[in-house]
């Protein structure tokens, strides 16, 4: 018999993620069948090998013991759990399904009842956790949430900290992707606290990565998400390629939303080698989705379509359900653009799997912004611009993807420059004469110096007096255009804007703001707020006005009971908005006949009819 370290020591190493230390102490060779504790040693051996990528060797060790001696149900359940995770990592979904389903079937057998409570709970944990992991991977987030909750209950009853961490991690992921973001973040924070207590540095790093990613994805770090993601990437070990790739993919999304397409392209090139060298199928799919989105924004429609078709062929229709839904959405956009290049498409939409109801309204802040961008009112334009999400401005202004446009806003100094996935906002330095000069440069013909000086400044052109003025003004415009300075062309005949660029003035976009009637919430969601009972007199009124109601107003109508009243200050605190916005929301509901208004001045309160 071999002289091996104590099982308790191996257990500590394993739950702390020290897999190399375990294999260094017990070796990678199969444990002799007559060794005392062969099952426990082999369990840690199999799990360590799987997590270090040595799947085939782990599988051989497990099958050798199972075929040679009668093993316990706990040993089988644990090893199948680890091997199932290994199969998912190798994209062997059939193998994963067999391991995880076999564990679930064992729960229904009679001999499962003839074991200790502690062992029973551990078996329940591994069985439910494995199935939850596979369901999550397939995009079945509701089932994953249910199963991970059951797994956590079993782990908690045993005070099995490692099990609690895994189940809370999966529960938090599922809740976030179902739309219950704050609850999901809370569960991930709980898992992080336990992981720190256990001393598992790998899990701590992974949880920190996902917390950063989710907070950025759902808009909880709205103003500085790019900086936070960049810092997190640089703080990771260069060998932690999976975590770095996850953060890079979210960083690219954030850059696209902010109209920083050139930077997004550079980051794609930086992360491409990491993803393709390590052949992670899931990350490869999201990488290709980002590439296709940038192609579409540049107007390279057929390149985007070719990439999407190739991506679809490499996905499993029974497993990659969530990714395929994203592929379908982007492919639909591409086909619409092929039929009508001037059609304005949303840059991004809220995930289809989201369950939006009165309980979790306002939790996905980025999703709310994406919804508002599709409505596209002038108020939304300035609010989204203030958040720095410049990538959403072209769809609000009605500018199709792939077009190069200079939007001249109504405010002094306001200019929006759109080119492919790049959107630049200028709010200073654009004087009235410079705006007028920019408008005059539009068109195929070169504009002479005489014409420009006369039209812009009302001067009778004199080269000695006015050439410096015109040259200085053209220079200022080029400085404002920055990397697109070459859009202003010069010849002996004068100046003009390159033919690929269009000028759009503020008045020309007014019809865009006035004509967009897409509802913030789809009819199913509106029904959830209003109730399906059409006998309620107020319900048809709510549905009729649902196009004009924001999320805060709908939530108030749903939750405020008859006989209850709310004041402006209470409403403002409840939704974390200023008193002026709260006053506008409540007054709007009153004007539409949806709420009663009682009192005057600061004593004014509102109640449902």
Image (cartoon, grey):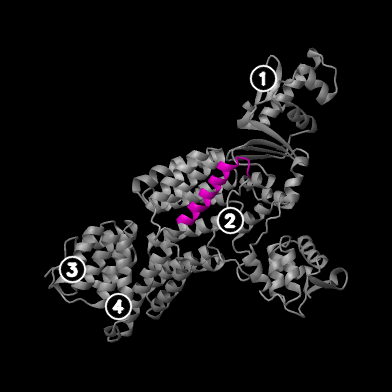
Q: Is residue 255 visible?
A: no
Percent position (x, y) of residue 79?
27, 69
Name the mark on residue 490.
Answer: 1
Quarter of the rendering occupied by the C terminus: bottom right
- On residue 4, the disc is 3
Q: What is the CA distance from the residue labelled 3 to the residue labelled 2? A: 49 Å
Question: Nearer the viewer's eye, disc 1 or disc 3?
Answer: 1
Query: In the visual, does 505 lie left or right of 327?
Result: right
Residue 537 x %, y %: 76, 75
Q: Label 3, label 4: how many angstroms apart (C-alpha)?
A: 31 Å
**Could you tell me which secondary element the residue under label 1 belongs to?**
strand
Which of the marked residues, 3 or 2, is nearer the chain's N terminus? 3
Crowd band around label 3 with a 10 angstrom C-alpha radius: few (<14), some (14–19), many (20+): some
Instruction: State which region is magenta.
Output: 323-343
Upstream in sequence: badge 4 or badge 1: 4
4 and 2 marks in contact (CB < 8 Å): no
> Pointer 2: residues within 10 angstroms few (<14), some, or many (20+)?
some
């Amino acid at each position: 018999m071999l002289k091996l370290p104590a099982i308790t020591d191996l257990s500590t190493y394993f739950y702390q993620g020290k897999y190399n230390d375990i294999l260094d102490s017990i070796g990678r060779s199969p444990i002799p069948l007559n060794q005392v504790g062969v099952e426990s040693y082999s369990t840690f051996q199999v799990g360590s090998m799987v997590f270090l990528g040595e799947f085939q060797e782990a599988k051989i060790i497990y099958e050798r013991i199972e075929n040679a001696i009668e093993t316990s149900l706990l040993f089988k359940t644990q090893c199948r759990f680890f091997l199932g995770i290994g199969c998912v990592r190798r994209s062997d979904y059939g193998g994963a399904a067999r391991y995880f389903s076999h564990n679930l079937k064992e729960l229904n057998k009679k001999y499962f009842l003839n074991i200790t409570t502690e062992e029973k709970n551990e078996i329940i944990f591994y069985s439910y956790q494995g199935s939850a992991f596979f369901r999550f991977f397939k995009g079945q987030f509701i089932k994953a949430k249910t199963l991970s909750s059951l797994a956590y209950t079993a782990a908690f009853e045993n005070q099995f900290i490692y099990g609690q961490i895994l189940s809370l991690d999966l529960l938090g992921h599922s809740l976030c992707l179902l739309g219950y973001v704050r609850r999901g973040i809370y569960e991930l924070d709980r898992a992080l606290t336990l992981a720190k207590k256990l001393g598992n540095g790998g899990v701590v790093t992974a949880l920190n990565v996902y917390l950063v990613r989710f907070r950025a994805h759902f808009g909880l770090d709205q103003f500085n998400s790019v900086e936070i993601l960049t810092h997190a990437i640089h703080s990771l070990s260069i060998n932690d390629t999976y975590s770095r790739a996850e953060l890079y993919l979210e960083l690219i999304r954030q850059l696209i939303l902010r109209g920083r397409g050139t930077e997004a392209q550079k980051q794609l090139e930086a992360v491409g080698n990491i993803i393709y060298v390590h052949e992670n199928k899931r990350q490869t799919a999201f990488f290709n989705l980002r590439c296709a989105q940038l192609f579409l924004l540049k107007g390279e429609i057929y390149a985007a379509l070719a990439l999407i078709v190739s991506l679809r062929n490499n996905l499993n229709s029974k497993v990659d359900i969530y990714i395929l839904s994203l592929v379908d959405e982007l492919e639909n956009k591409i086909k619409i653009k092929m039929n009508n290049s001037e059609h304005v498409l949303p840059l991004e939409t809220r995930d289809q799997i989201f369950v939006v109801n009165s309980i979790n309204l306002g939790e996905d802040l980025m999703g709310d912004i994406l919804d508002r961008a599709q409505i596209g009112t002038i108020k939304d334009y300035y609010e989204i611009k203030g958040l720095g999400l410049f990538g959403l401005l072209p769809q609000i202004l009605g500018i199709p993807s792939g077009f190069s446009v200079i939007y001249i806003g109504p405010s002094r100094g306001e200019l929006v420059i759109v080119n492919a996935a790049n959107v630049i906002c200028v709010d200073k330095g654009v004087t009235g004469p410079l705006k007028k000069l920019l408008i005059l440069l539009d068109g195929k013909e070169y504009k002479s110096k005489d014409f420009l000086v006369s039209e812009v400044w009302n001067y009778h052109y004199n080269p000695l007096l006015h050439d410096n003025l015109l040259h200085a003004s053209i220079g200022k415009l080029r400085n404002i255009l920055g990397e697109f300075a070459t859009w202003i062309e010069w010849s002996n005949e004068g100046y003009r804007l390159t033919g690929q660029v269009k000028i759009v003035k503020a008045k020309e976009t007014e019809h865009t703001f006035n004509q967009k009637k897409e509802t913030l919430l789809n009819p199913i969601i509106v029904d959830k707020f209003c109730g399906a009972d059409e006998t309620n007199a107020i319900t048809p009124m709510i549905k009729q006005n649902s196009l004009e109601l924001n999320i805060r107003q709908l939530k108030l109508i749903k939750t405020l009971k008859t006989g209850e009243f709310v004041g402006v200050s209470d409403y403002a605190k409840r939704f974390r908005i200023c008193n002026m916005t709260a006053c506008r929301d409540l007054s709007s509901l009153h004007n539409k006949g949806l709420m009663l208004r009682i009192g005057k001045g600061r004593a004014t309160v509102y109640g449902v009819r």
